[in-house]
Image (cartoon, grey):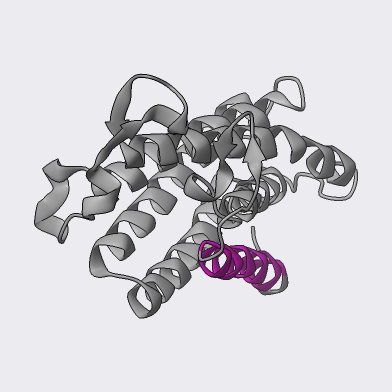
């Protein structure tokens, strides 16, 4: 069972990640990579957001899925409130929905794989959660089909070469989604390092190894 002290610690960590990501999303990554202008595709928020999966997975490992869902709920509330204050209603709906659904999928996958090789649960859970998170966010935020949530961003839906270099064209938000998920996959792999290092410290409490 998650006691108040650990709930506060994990909730503060999750809130910090959400706040940092919402702040850093305002700053594009400057530079060129293989002829691609990174400022057109990525913000620094893409590098901090995947840490939320690490917080969720450590909570899940130590206290189980129910405790992890409580911590995710705190992050969801913080994220929605920040988005309402700092962004448009459509972005608030998109970011809140994507965060909640992606994190809940990560919890479910992690719990099913937790008895297998140590790296499978955090890696597969975070990658699947990130894929769903990315698809939901960019679709709700920019796809014309969801225009009833709020006005479309003309720049985002305008056709452009995919990733700025391919001959095939698609709405710009498709390139943004591809670049965003690529970074999330990279960070998801890197996050195995702190997860593995903390395994001996963050040990499962009794009764947390059962699916729930």
Residue at 67% x, 66% y is 13
Residue 176 pos. (x, y %): 43, 41
**Left or right: 198, with 120 as reference point:** right
Residue 34, by quadrant, is top right
Seen from the viewer's position, the closer of residues 85 and 163 is 163
Q: Is residue 166 above or below residue 33?
A: above
- Magenta residue span: 6-25
**Left or right: 25, with 60 as reference point:** left
Residue 25 pos. (x, y %): 52, 61
Residue 7, visible in the rendered structure: yes
Residue at 38% x, 70% y is 83
Seen from the viewer's position, the closer of residues 117 and 171 is 171
Residue 132, visible in the rendered structure: no
Q: Is residue 183 above or below residue 170?
A: below
Q: Is residue 209 magenta?
A: no
Residue 102, by quadrant, is top left
Residue 19 pos. (x, y %): 56, 70
Q: Main secondary structure of the magenta part?
A: helix
Residue that protrudes farthest toward the left in the picture: 148
Residue at 57% x, 44% y is 38
**Left or right: 121, with 181 as reference point:** right
Seen from the viewer's position, the closer of residues 71 and 132 is 132
Residue 135 pos. (x, y %): 36, 37
**Left or right: 82, with 61 as reference point:** left
Residue that protrudes farthest toward the bottom in the picture: 85
């Amino acid at each position: 069972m998650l006691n108040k002290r650990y709930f506060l610690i994990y909730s503060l960590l999750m809130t910090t990640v959400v706040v940092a990501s919402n702040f850093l999303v305002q700053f594009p990554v400057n530079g060129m990579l293989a002829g691609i202008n990174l400022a057109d595709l990525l913000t620094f928020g893409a590098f901090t957001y995947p840490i939320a999966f690490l917080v969720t997975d450590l909570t899940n490992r130590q206290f189980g899925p129910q405790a992890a869902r409580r911590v995710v709920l705190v992050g969801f509330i913080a994220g929605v409130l920040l988005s309402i204050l700092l962004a448009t209603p459509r972005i608030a709906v998109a970011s809140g929905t994507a965060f909640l659904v992606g994190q809940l999928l990560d919890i479910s996958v992690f719990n099913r794989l937790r008895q297998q090789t140590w790296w499978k649960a955090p890696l597969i859970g975070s990658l699947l959660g990130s894929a769903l998170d990315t698809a939901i966010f960019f679709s709700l935020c920019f796809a014309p089909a969801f225009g009833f949530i709020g006005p479309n961003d003309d720049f985002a839906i305008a056709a452009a070469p995919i990733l700025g270099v391919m001959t095939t064209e698609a709405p710009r938000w498709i390139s943004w989604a591809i670049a965003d998920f690529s970074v999330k996959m990279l960070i998801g792999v890197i996050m195995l390092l702190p997860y593995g290092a903390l395994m001996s410290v963050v040990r499962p409490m009794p009764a947390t190894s059962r699916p729930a």
